[in-house]
Structures are given as C-alpha cells and as structure tokens.
Image (cartoon, grey):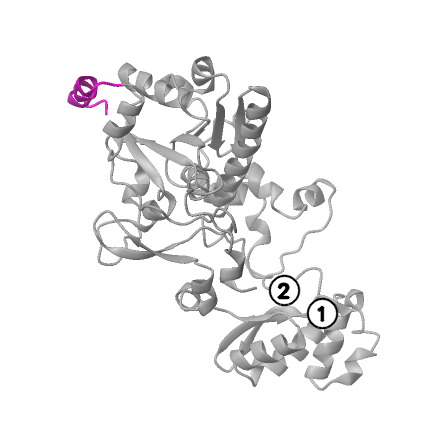
Amino acid sequence: MDKTEFYADARTDMTGPLAGVRVVEATTTWAGPMAGCMLADLGASVIKVEHPAGEVIRRLPPMLPDSHLFLGNEMVNRNKRNVTVDLHKPEGVEVFLRLAASADIVIENFRPGTMDAWGVGYAAVKEKNPRTVYVSISGYGQFGPLSERVGYDPIAQFYSGWAAQNGEIDGLPVKAGTFLCDDLAGVHGAVSALAAFHHAKETGEGQHVDVALVDTIQFQSDGYLTAGATDMKLDRWGSQFAIAAPVNRYACTDGHVYAGVLLDTHWMRLADIMERPDLKTDERYATNMARVQPGNREDVDGFLADWCAVRTSGEVESIFEEAGLPATRVNTFAEVAKKPHTLARDMLQQTELSDGSVVPLTGPAAKFSRTPTRIRSAAAPLGKHTSEVLKELGYAESEIYALSEKHIV
C-alpha cells in the first residue's frame, strides 16, 4: 500500500485518537513516563508533574550531541506539558489534588505507599473525583509479600526469571540491552488505563490500576512462568529458535545475518537454494520435528552457516526475499536509522528541542489512518506550563505568585 493511500482520509484538526482525554502523571525515570508518553503520542493532553528540582531522568546519560539535554528525557517526555509542584508541602498537595480532580487518568510510579504518605494516593484522589482512573506502576506491585521492596528494571529482569533465559547457550544470564521491563510496564500501564477509562465512561466508576514490572515481564515471557510452575525443562537458546531449525545468527563475508526457516515448505525452498535436494527427503531433516532434535539441529544449522559464510549479508537477504524466506542483516541502530524503510515509517521525526537544537526523535509506533499521531512538541523545560495549568484550575495570578514565592511551584 502507498503511504498517501493509507492516510487518504486523515484528519488534520486533532492531536490523535485520544484528543480530549486529560492525563496527569507524577512519575520518574522511565516506566511511568513511558505510560504517559504513549497516551500523549496518541493525542491525550498529558501534564507531567515534577518536583521543582526536577526528576532524575533530566540528569541521566546519554546526553544528546551538540546539546545540554539528555536523550531519555527528550524521548519519554515529549508531547507533554510540564508543571512543578512540591508534594512534600500541604499547599503542593492541594495543587495536585485539584489537578488530579480535573483528570480522566492519573499515573504514578513511585514506591508503593509513597503517594499515600504525601496525601495524593488513590484514596485522596478518589475522594475528589470518583471517576478518576489511577494507575500505579511499581517493581513488585501494590500488594504481595515483596510489594514494599525497591525494584528497578534490571532487578525485575533477573527476579522474574526472564534474564535466566537470555544469553548464549553456554553463557551466563544476561539483561536486555534496553529498559525492557520499564517499557513493558509503560505499555501495560497505558493499555490498562484506557481499559479502565472506558469502564469509567460507561459506568461512572473510576478505579485503581496496579501494574508491576515483574508481572509484565512474566506475562510477556511466552508462557514460561507456567512452564516453570509445571517443571518443564527450559533451555537457553542464544540466537537459535527453540521451536524451529535452522534459525540463527550466521556470519557472512561482511557481517552477520539472522535467517532461518519456520515451516517445512520453507525448508524445501532452502534446500533448493543451498543446492541440496537430498535434504528434502532425508528423514533426519525433512520435517521440523526431526530438525529440532539434538544432533539434527546442529547439522542443519551447520548447512546454513556454511552457505552464508561465502556470501555477503546483502546477497543472503536478496536470495531469501526472492524465495519468500525470512532474513535480515544484523543491523546496528546507527545503520537502521539510515534505512529508507525507517524514514518512510516516520520512525524518526525531526524535532526542535527546548535549547533550539534539532534532533531526529523516535516516532510513535502505531499508525492511524484517520487520526494520525506525531511528535507535536519536544520535552518541556522544567515548570514551563505551571502558571498556564494553574490558571486553568482557577488559581489567580496572585495565588500562583504566592505559591512560587514559597517554592511550592
């Protein structure tokens, strides 16, 4: 499909499919801000509440080239307005509760009990607005024996069992190269918020949504938690594929490809490509169930490795594509950032940041033909919209000035 055809009926008068939905987030670092980022990218009006000193993501590397700004903050806090409020002070609590009362969704990701201790937990917000959806994201959840334990992304990866499955076959457990648990918790936080918001619209009933990093990574682990509970043997596969063979990372003359076959019809085509028609009828290799058996797996993996070793990654990609088989060069982010497909999908969007620099920020993933999404604004400087938002809540200029003088906002 042509891109212009996909967007033929696109509207230009809306921020996205969530236009009109109001979100308030009191969050830090990644999981909570990611939930808010997803809702903001989808068009919601998201107000990020920070302490007047700023939250930690504003100071975590890496720093963007030719800029004094940090990549993480710019990525996860775009499309939001920013308000500073000191929740340690009674006047700040009152500001937040008025702000939360105006929201459809509230998101927080502090350690369980923290928001309650500050006087801005679910019970306090519910008293102001029973329809509010209040999303709490934490390491281990709001209840359970470990709920009060400190939990960050890599801790969740290793606690949950996920890291034990990751890494080379004969190596040690390895964490993901990205904030995988934080990202998944952010996605589940956003999706769950929308589900609860739908319920609130239908019934008038708000609710508390509890999202735990360890729960989300266990849910997204392909049933392996059930496998562990039933004492099924779980092997670490490295770059191989447990359910099919041959599938692996293979060396070429100019790098590596990731390639393989999933179906027996694929294997027949691959055998012809490798000029090994005998493999199509050999009972050790003719079916996937046979190919994944110990010994046979190593054989077919070696056949494909030898075939790739004398070809460039581009040749392998082209031959596989022509045959309808899956293969890709093993790209770095720097390489894939230059790919025409990346640009055609708007996955990099030139964005002017608050310091005037222009950076290609990673764009929203989902595409909407009627209500397109985009990066509408860069991450806001600390407190940029405080006065604007407080005026929307009914605060007079003099009241805002008094709060500022007391360093509450």
Q: Nearer the viewer, residue 79 or 34?
A: 79
Prevailing SS of the magenta stretch: helix
Check if mark 1's residue and mark 2's residue have beta carbons within 8 Å. Answer: yes
Q: Can residue 42 be seen in this view?
A: yes
Based on the displayed image, in which of its 4 quarters is residue 260 positioned? bottom right
Question: CA–CA distance between discs 1 and 2?
Answer: 10 Å
Q: Can residue 317 be found in the magenta stretch?
A: no
Task: Say which residue appears at 57% left-offset and 79% top-offset.
Answer: 318
Q: Write down the region rendered in magenta.
A: 395-409
Say if 87 sits above or below 286 in the image: above
Dot 1 or dot 2: first in sequence order is 2
Horizontal side of residue 326 vs 46, given as left or right? right
Q: How crowded is mark 1: few (under 14 residues within 10 Å), some or many (20 or more)?
A: many
Give the x, y percent position of residue 313.
53, 78
Q: Position of residue 36 (x, y in %)?
A: 43, 37
Question: Which of 409/280 is in front?
Answer: 409
The answer to whether 408 is drawn above or below residue 22 in the figure is above
Name the residue beneath numbered marker 2. Answer: 240
Image-based side of 262 in relation to 346, left or right: right
Question: Mark 2, residues whose alpha carbon is within 10 Å: few (<14), some, or many (≥20)?
Answer: many
Give the residue type that dot 2 points to. Gln
Residue 21 in the image, given as x and y percentages of width and height = 45, 32
Q: Classify mark 2: helix, strand or loop.
A: loop
* Of 345 and 135, the residue lying toward us: 345
For badge 1, the amino acid type reads Arg
Residue 184 or residue 16, whichever sits in front: 16
Q: Is residue 296 left or right of residue 311?
A: right
Q: Residue beneath label 1, please?
A: 297
Can I make out residue 160 in this image? no
Element type at mark 1 = helix
Decide: is 200 above or below 261. Answer: above
